[in-house]
Amino acid sequence: MSSNKTTPVLIADDEPVMRQLLTSILRTEGYVDVRQASDGQQALDVLTAPDCDIGIAFLDISMPAFSGLEVMSIARAALPDCFFVIVSAHSALDNVLAALSDGARGFVVKPYTGQKIHDIVQKFQNRTTP
């Protein structure tokens, strides 16, 4: 089985510090192609592009233009196999349940830690592919 660490990753978050922190953690995990979007519209532009090859998308639940849940809902039609992870500073149960019921494969509460991201990356790498 080939490593998924060559898979392009998208981080969509309106906080530059959070994007940089997650990028740094993902690079530590071995990911080299980490792309960033600073709001929901930029994330949608990347995820709905005809040649999009994003395999994992970390989407902040609260962003300008579109929320992470809205981005995921729209982008899933274009990228049904993408591994969507919703991130939020708020771990309210309704946020978590909404994200997971809408098709997210994971939910991470900020601030990011290496262990939280490692666990999500492991889940992505171990998922069964058709």
Image (tube, rainbow, N blue to C red):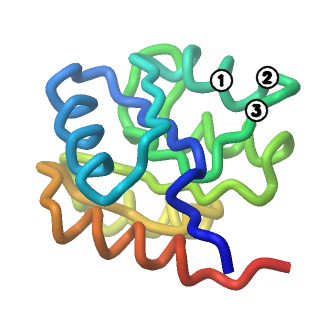
Depth order, front residue of 105/11: 11
The local secondary structure at tag 1 comes to helix
| Disc 3 target residue | 52
Q: Are marks 2 and 1 in contact (CB under 8 Å)?
A: yes
| Residue 3 horizontal/vertical position (percent) | 57, 68
Give me the residue at 68% from left, 54% from top: 82
Q: Quadrant of the C terminus?
A: bottom right
Q: CA distance from mark 3 to mark 2?
A: 5 Å
| Residue 105 horizontal/vertical position (percent) | 54, 68
The local secondary structure at tag 2 comes to loop
Q: CA distance from mark 2 to mark 1?
A: 5 Å
Depth order, front residue of 17/41: 17
32 over 14 or under it: above or below: below
The local secondary structure at tag 3 comes to loop
What is the quadrant of residue 69 in the picture?
top right
| Disc 1 target residue | 46
| Residue 68 horizontal/vertical position (percent) | 49, 38
Q: Amino acid at mark 3?
A: Cys
| Residue 35 horizontal/vertical position (percent) | 47, 28
Give me the residue at 47% from left, 78% from top: 123
Q: Amino acid at mark 2?
A: Ala
Q: Amino acid at mark 1?
A: Val
Q: CA distance from mark 1 to mark 3?
A: 7 Å
Q: Would you call the spot at circle 1 few (<14 residues within 10 Å), some (14-19), or many (20 or more)?
A: some
Q: Quadrant of the N terminus?
A: bottom right
Q: Are marks 3 and 2 in contact (CB under 8 Å)?
A: yes
Of all residues, the one furthest to the front in this rendering is 2
Q: Which mark is residue 49?
A: 2
118 over 14 or under it: above or below: below
Depth order, front residue of 59/30: 30
Q: Are marks 1 and 3 in contact (CB under 8 Å)?
A: yes
